[in-house]
Image: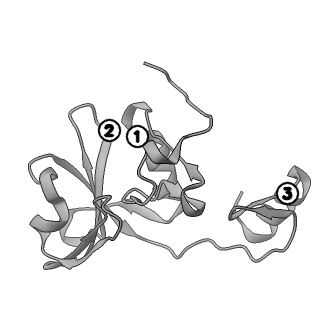
Amino acid sequence: MRDEWLGKVDPSSVGTDCNCHGLSLAGGNIIIEDISENADAITAILNDDGYIVSDYSNASLIVVIDDDNRPVHSVLKYSVSNFSADHGEGLPTLNVNYETAMAGSIIMNNLYFRRKSKDKKINTKSGQTSKGVRTMNNKKLKKIMEDTGLE
């Protein structure tokens, strides 16, 4: 099994319409495939987005994991009876019950998270934008991160 993988992905084989883990970014131009042990990539994204570990009653996000502790599905929880998920058929399933949102993952193990902070957003026109991705040099990026507390 490979520890890291980075390269060009053929979107026709991935299902870039599916974004249940928040890993298909920039309109499907960037896809993060988490093959790490204990879902390190997904955990890092959740931490960056302000999610912390929770219990079911306080959770706003449920991540379904397989027997190898790898995420296979995620569901947003709005209330005890209102959930949403994206099953990869093009449109998310919004405002549905728990069973519908979980689909075939209902008997698997779950991790629960709640949102502790707001999105970290940066307003900048630095660098260049291509296919929804802004690139800039390391010096400018470091300055922005320092100024916004994202270090």
Query: Is the residue 68 above or below the residue 139 in the image?
Result: above
Q: Mark 2 = which residue?
A: 70
Q: Are marks 2 and 1 in contact (CB under 8 Å)?
A: yes
The amino acid type of the residue labelled 1 equals Ala
Q: Badge 1: few (under 14), some or many (20 or more) residues near its Cα, within 10 Å?
A: some
Front tag of 3 and 1? 3
Q: In the rendering, which numbered label is found on residue 90?
A: none
The amino acid type of the residue labelled 2 equals Arg
Q: Earlier in the sequence, mark 2 or mark 1?
A: 1
Q: In the rendering, which numbered label is found on residue 136?
A: 3
Q: Residue at x 52, y 76 (%)?
A: 118
User: What is the spatial separation of the Cα atoms under label 3 and label 2, in whole angstroms?
Assistant: 33 Å
| Residue 116 point in image, percent of width and height | 44, 71
The amino acid type of the residue labelled 3 equals Met
9 on left or right of 101: right
The count of marks equals 3
Q: Badge 3: few (under 14), some or many (20 or more) residues near its Cα, within 10 Å?
A: few
Query: Is the residue 39 above or below the residue 147 in the image?
Result: above
Element under disc 3: loop
Q: Mark 1 = which residue?
A: 39
28 on left or right of 21: right
Where the N terminus falls, by quadrant?
Answer: top left
Q: Are marks 3 and 1 in contact (CB under 8 Å)?
A: no
